[in-house]
Image: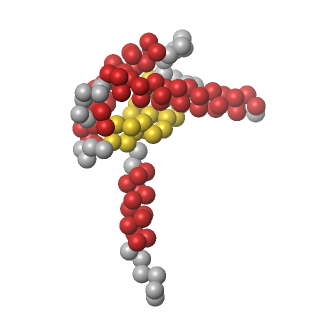
């Protein structure tokens, strides 16, 4: 049981490290890219024995499909740069997923504001 806890702790550490390094790569290498310069990484989860990391992002752009396509196109180059910055033998595959938590929270706030509590 303890071993499993250490493993999940290691997965969280690897995911956090990947998130930090990919954020730096986006800042350093893609600052001139209009779509990617507005991307903020908001979370990361490691899967598959640390072979795969899902990176959750938020973007100020209204065209999320274009942002996702641009991230998908840049993933190979980002992973190559990630390998150069990580002190690990194996570099996990990365995938980007849009995080719509802020939009959901905004929708809930609007619904709550529209409730008629005076009944």
* Residue 108, quarter of picture: bottom left
Residue shown at the point (41%, 56%) measured from the top left: 104
Q: Nearer the viewer, residue 90 or 85?
A: 85
Q: From the viewer's perspective, is 97 left or right of 30?
A: right
Is residue 52 among what the camera can see?
no
Count of labels in the image: 0
Quadrant that contains the N terminus: top right
| Position of residue 38 measured from the top left corner of the image (x, y, whole percent) | 31, 37
Q: Is residue 3 above or below residue 79?
A: below
Image quadrant in which you'd find residue 78: top left
Name the outermost residue toward the bottom: 119
Q: Residue at x 25, y 47 (%)?
A: 62
Q: Position of residue 82 (x, y in %)?
A: 43, 18
Question: Residue drawn 27% across and 43% down?
Answer: 61
Residue 42 visible? The answer is yes
Q: Position of residue 23 (x, y in %)?
A: 41, 29
Q: Quadrant of residue 25?
A: top left
Q: Is residue 31 left or right of residue 12?
A: left
Q: Could you tell me which residue is drawn at 46 percent across and 86 percent down? A: 118
Identify the coloring: secondary structure
Query: Residue 84 location, x and y as percent?
Result: 44, 12
């Amino acid at each position: 049981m303890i071993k499993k806890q250490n493993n999940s702790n290691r997965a969280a550490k690897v995911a956090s490290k990947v998130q930090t390094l990919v954020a730096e790569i986006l800042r350093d290498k893609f600052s001139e890219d209009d779509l990617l310069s507005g991307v903020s990484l908001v979370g990361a989860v490691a899967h598959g024995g640390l072979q795969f990391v899902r990176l959750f992002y938020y973007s100020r752009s209204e065209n999320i499909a274009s942002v996702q396509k641009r991230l998908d196109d840049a993933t190979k180059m980002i992973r190559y740069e990630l390998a150069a910055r990580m002190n690990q033998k194996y570099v996990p595959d990365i995938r980007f997923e849009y995080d719509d938590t802020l939009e959901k929270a905004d929708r809930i706030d609007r619904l709550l504001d529209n409730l008629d509590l005076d009944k």
